[in-house]
Amino acid sequence: AIKKARPCAILSVFKPNSDINHTITMMRNVVRSLGCKRLALFSQRSLSTAVNEKVIIDHHSNSTSSHKPGFNSEEIHRLPNDVHKRNALYSSEDERSMGGITASVRHDWSKEEIAEIYKLPFGELMYRASTVHRMYWDPSEVQQCTLLSIKTGGCTEDCGYCSQSVRYKTFVKPTPTMKVQEVLEAARRAKEAGSTRFCMGAAWRELGNKKNAFNHILEMVRGVNGMGLEVCCTLGMLNADQAKQLKEAGLTAYNHNLDTSPEHYP
C-alpha cells in the first residue's frame, strides 16, 4: 500500500563541527516555516562515503588529449556511444527482466500505455526507470553532453518557468540565431572538452515557416554529426517533413517539453 506523502524538510549541514546552538535554531526555523513533521539531515562527511570512485565518464580521446592517471582505455569496455548502434545490439531480443520488471527496446507505444506510465506514483516511476536503465546500461557510465542556446529569448510562449518568454520581465536579452560557423566552433570546443553529445536549443514556439533558419540548422546538424558527436535539438513544434529532414541530416534525438500541469495549463 502507498502511504500518503508527509511534508519533510532536508537540511544540509555543510559544517558538522559548527556551533550546535546555531544549528538547532536553524532546524527549528525550517520546521516551523514549512510545517514539516520530519527533518532529514546530511553532511558532506556522511555523503563522502557514498561516492563511487569508479564512475566512468564518457569522453573522446584524441592525439591532443591525455588519459586520466590510473585509467587504461583498453581495460574499459564500453557499449557503442551512438544510440542507434546500441539499440541494434538488442534487435534480436524480445525482452529483458530484472527485479520483477520486464522491458524491451520498442518504438510502438500506444497512448494508453504512455498514460499508464504518466500516472504512476513518482517513487514507482523512479524504481522502474532505474531498473530498466540497469538492464541495458552500465550504471557507472556518465555521458558528458554540451547544450548550446543557438537562439536566446524573445519566445512568444507563456511557459511559467521560462525566463526566455516575452510575456515576463527578465534579464534575458533576446538575440538572433547564431551563425553556422559559430555553432560548429562551439561543438569543436565541446568535443575537445570531453563531450560526446551536442544539443542545440532555440527559444521559439515552433519552426513554422522559418525556412532560412531551418536550412542553417540542418547545416549545423550535418556539421556536428560529421565530428563524430551525437546531435540533439530542441526547436519547438515540427511538422513531419521537418522531422524527416533533421533525421536525414544526422540528428540523434529530439527534445520537446510537454507542459501538462493542470494548475498552470488547465
Image: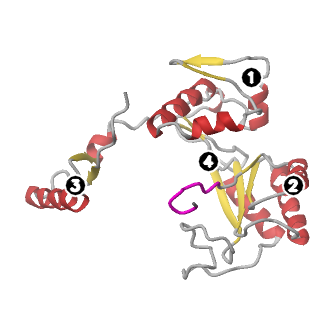
Left or right position of 143 against 47: right
Please check the rendered image and state whether residue 261 is part of the magenta-colored stretch, yes or no. yes
Left or right position of 30 against 151: left
Does the CB distance between marks 1 and 3 fall below 8 Å? no
**Magenta part of the chain:** 258-265
Q: Would residue 254 be seen by someone viewing this image from the given angle?
A: yes
Residue 197 image offset from top left, x and y in percent: 70, 49
Does the CB distance between marks 4 and 1 fall below 8 Å? no
Looking at the rendered structure, the secondary structure element under dot 1 is: loop
Whole-angstrom CA distance, mark 4 to mark 1, is: 24 Å
The residue that disc 1 covers is: 90
The residue that disc 3 covers is: 15
User: In the rendered view of the protein, which quadrant contains the N terminus?
Assistant: top left
Corner quadrant of residue 241? bottom right
Q: Amino acid at mark 2?
A: Arg
The residue that disc 4 covers is: 144
Q: Earlier in the sequence, mark 1 or mark 2?
A: 1
Q: Nearer the viewer, residue 50 or 173?
A: 173
Q: Which mark is residue 222?
A: 2
